[in-house]
Image (cartoon, rainbow, N blue to C red):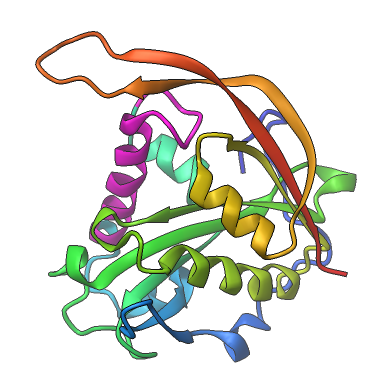
Amino acid sequence: MSSAYGKIDRPKEYNSSKLEFLLPIESSSKSNQTVSVHWLSAIQSQLSDPFRLKSYLRTLLNTEIEAGNTYPQKFLLDESQFENYFLSGDVFIVLNGGKSVPKDLENNLEENLLGTFYVKPNFPGRCSHICNAGFITAPAYRNQGIGKIMALAYLQIAPLLGYKASMFNLVFANNIASIRLWRSLGFQEIGRVPNAGLLVKDKKTNNEVEEEEYVDAIMFYYSFT
């Protein structure tokens, strides 16, 4: 796993076997739509073309990067960069329907895949028991509670993997929905990074110059113990 510290190994307490008893997690959206959280590693054998799903996940992340106001990356990620960043830990996806994987998943990804998140160490070595996570809700399914479904699943999944705590380094102050969610779930605000991100203020079209502004970031912490 790559980071500012180089390659990061999972903590010595890491154990993914317990996820088999937890996942998939079935839940309901705000519109009472049945959805379920799956571990990507557990369903890959059911896919005829796993690359197609991974490519779609990369598209979701690159859409966020291009928007310029939630993730810190400035340039779109190629396949290798996406593998190193998003797929270097444990990845989970939210699918339309109950606990069974939709038979047409790969042929109708936009309809079937509602969101995704990764879990991986935030720091190396002696601090690798503190994890980090990144969340993306598919654009067509926003404001339906998918973010909260992923957050609640994360709080169950991360400690089962062997992590003792969670830390989010850069939750930008303009991301009101995300800040409200983490506060509601009891995450502690342990710091604020002034002018942490040069974010897009106003998305332009027709080759116009985009307006950018520096935005603070909040650091959130949650103990699993």
* Placement of 208 over or under 38, stated as above or below: above
- Image quarter of residue 77: top left
How far across and how far down the image is residue 211, in percent?
34, 13
Task: Answer whether residue 84 is magenta in the image.
Answer: no
How far across and how far down the image is residue 98, in percent?
35, 90
Q: Is residue 45 left or right of residue 21?
A: left
Q: Main secondary structure of the magenta part?
A: helix
The one nearer the camera, 130 or 1, is 130
* Placement of 179 over or under 119, stated as above or below: above
How far across and how far down the image is residue 158, in percent?
69, 67
Q: What residue is shown at x 46% (from left), y 37% (from top)? A: 70
Q: What residue is shown at x 88% (from left), y 70% (from top)? A: 225
Q: Is residue 106 left or right of residue 119?
A: left
Task: Answer whether residue 53 is magenta in the image.
Answer: yes
Q: What residue is shown at x 28% (from left), y 61% (from top)? A: 53
The N terminus lies in quadrant: top right
- Image quarter of residue 6: top right
Q: Is residue 1 left or right of residue 46?
A: right
The residue sitting at the top extreme is 209
Q: Which residues are magenta?
A: 52-75
How far across and how far down the image is residue 100, in percent?
34, 90
Residue 89 in view of the camera: no
- Image quarter of residue 172: top right
